[in-house]
């Protein structure tokens, strides 16, 4: 009994034809549903991946810009300090007494009857 296949005849009726069509339609709908879900999942994954890559690129760009900003801030402070020093020097250069002092010191200009002795700046060796 177990090795023999039993052949069952199908009833040919309008109801069975409609039922078989209904089952086939459900199978087709399931098949299309799985395809749509797979397509939707692929679109979601691609979108999510693209957004993730974009986000990581933006974070890296932000980090670079922040480092550049910090470097420029330090440079700005340095330039402000230099500007302040140069403004002070300009004010001193407008003073004639200061100019005469520089001329005497650097260019050995002397007043009448004055003798200038240049002493080396080297430290004596002991």
Image: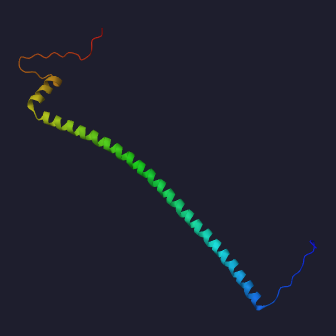
Residue 61 relative to residue 124: left or right: right
The residue sitting at the front extreme is: 1
Q: Is residue 40 above or below residue 101?
A: below
Q: Is residue 22 above or below residue 119?
A: below
Quarter of the rendering occupied by the N terminus: bottom right
Q: x, y percentage for residue 74?
A: 32, 41
Q: Residue at x 82, y 88 (%)?
A: 11
Q: Quadrant of the C terminus?
A: top left
Residue 9, located in which quarter of the rendered image?
Answer: bottom right
Task: Using the image as rendered, state which of residue 125 and residue 25 is in the foreground.
Answer: 25
In this rendering, the answer to whether 36 lies above or below 123 is below
Depicted 107 relative to depicted 115: above or below: below
Could you say which is closer to the camera, residue 5 or residue 107? 5
| x, y percent for residue 68 | 37, 46
**Residue 113 % position (x, y):** 6, 17
Task: Give the side of residue 86 with respect to residue 57, left or right.
Answer: left
Task: Give the percent coordinates (x, y) of residue 34.
Answer: 65, 71
Counting the numbered discs, the total is: 0
Q: Residue furthest left?
A: 112
- The structure residue drawn at horizontal position 57% and vertical position 63%, both measured from the top left corner, is 45
Q: Residue at the location (63% across, 74% down)? A: 33
The residue furthest bottom is 14
Q: Residue 50 versus residue 110: which sits nearer the camera? A: 50
Residue at horizontal 24 percent and vertical 17 percent from the top: 121
């Amino acid at each position: 009994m177990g090795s023999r296949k039993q052949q069952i005849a199908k009833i040919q009726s309008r109801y069975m034809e409609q039922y078989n069509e209904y089952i086939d339609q459900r199978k087709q709908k399931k098949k299309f549903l799985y395809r749509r879900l797979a397509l939707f999942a692929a679109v979601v994954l691609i979108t999510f991946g693209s957004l993730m890559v974009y986000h990581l690129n933006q974070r890296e760009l932000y980090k670079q810009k922040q480092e550049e900003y910090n470097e420029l801030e330090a440079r700005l402070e340095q330039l402000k300090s230099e500007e302040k020093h140069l403004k002070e020097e300009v004010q001193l250069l407008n003073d004639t007494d200061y100019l005469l002092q520089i001329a005497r010191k650097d260019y050995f200009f002397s007043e009448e009857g004055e003798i200038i002795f240049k002493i080396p700046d080297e430290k004596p060796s002991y």
